[in-house]
Amino acid sequence: MTTDILDQILRFLRDYLGIAAEADLDLIEAGVDSLRIEELGAFIELQFGVPAARLSLRDAPTPAALASWVARAR
Amino acid sequence: MIRRLGILALTAAGASLVVRWPGAIRSITLWEQASLPLGLAALAVALVPERHARGTQELALVGVYLAQRVGSVTLDAGLGPWWDLPLGLVVCLLPWARPGWRTAGIWTAVAGFAAALVAPGIFGGLAEHLLIQLLFIAAMTDGLGPRDALRYTLACLIAPRMSVPPPDALRVDREPSSLLRGGAWLLLGLTLSRLPLARRLAERDPWSALLDGDVLMGLNEAVRVTGLELLLVAARLLVLAGTLRLLGMPIRAPVDAPWRATDLLDWWRRTHAWRSVVFRAAFLQHLGGSGPFAIFGVFFISGMQHAIGEPHAWGEVAVWAALGALAAANLAALRVITRRRVARWMETGVKHTPSKLGQLAATGAVIVVQGLMLGMLHHLGD
């Protein structure tokens, strides 16, 4: 299930945010600022039904970590 | 070798510029005071073999710290008291990672601000200058080992106006070319600020003498800069950029491009890029999320901090609270709009692209709102 979530997050990063991300890419280093975190949070909420109000890239700094965070929260 | 010699020559030239004009020391900004010792520390690191770089840097930082404190006593330069290093060391040793400690620190600082607004005194001063600084350092050193935390604390204490730089500041693996560029900017800035015209400007208007990198931090100060003062701003901007480069940081670390702001919150974040990161780490993430209420809280606390000792303190707090309410409403609206755009993309695959005209209008609106707030603050000050 986590792999499926990861694929969808990577697709959003690539197609919506324009970031050619890999599973272990550091999202802050890749330019995901607070505005983009809002966009990422909105996607996670709409796609997976997980409230992303407390989403922090400190806890989930990479797409892989983010996918695990979503899988745990579901 | 040529680059190292270049760094050596630039630092020597910068040192001569500062040392040859002892009479101009009073008009030297904190950045200029810091730039020379930081340049020397960078030089020390650049000139020693890589395997000794880290130890050399720590020794250089301690040396710079001691030199600054001696300088602050003899020149009355106000670079900080002697007891800040012992306190910084205490911060490294305290178990700040425990949520209870951090929460207690935050609320003690807030209580200190409130107490100082009612009756300015030592407690307010401690809360404003010490506790917040310690909280910021604690937030930024979270997860670092004791040795790195100590180096970071030293860097914080040495560099004025950089009270809480990113933890990877003063890296030991900086490129010599970057140091060289920083040294060149610094030298140019110091030279410009020593021009007779710049010195006359600084002596004529005490306000001019205070201009430094902060003019970029927001319209608060920038609107007050006119005419030839721009020369001083340019000189001090070069000093700021050069010093940052010596620390291994680009100028966009503290100030992102404010002209690209799309709304009020984005403008604040860009003009306070550095502080935005620190606030998020020290307060918002710790107290739970970065929602509109948290944003309002940060503005309200900042308002209390700024208003301490002002003649119309509570009026100033009210203006900050109004700005916080606007920023919170801004964030709430942004979330709704963002959610709608993402939902549309998920349904249709069509992505929203902002128009230049819309962005221009948004920036204009931000400037108007900020101008109104400034007008109210100045009115209170009069």
Image (cartoon, rainbow, N blue to C red):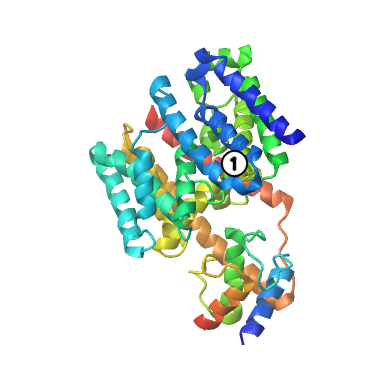
Quadrant of the image containing the C terminus of chain B: top left
Give the left or right position of residue B34, taking residue B101 as reference.
right
Q: Chain of mark 1?
A: B
The residue that disc 1 covers is B247
Give the left or right position of residue B144, taking residue B200 as reference.
left
**In the rendered image, which quarter is residue B85 located in?**
top left
Residue at the location (50% across, 25% down)? B210
In this rendering, is residue B34 above or below B340?
above
Residue at the location (25% across, 37% down)? B122
Q: Amino acid at mark 1?
A: Leu
Closer to us: B141 or B237: B141
- The location of residue B280, given as percent across then percent down, is 48, 56
- The location of residue B374, given as percent across then percent down, is 48, 36
**In the rendered image, which quarter is residue B21 located in?**
top right
Crowd tier of the residue under label 1, counting other residues whose Cα lies within 10 Å: few below 14, some 14–19, many 20 or above: many
Residue B263, can we see it? yes
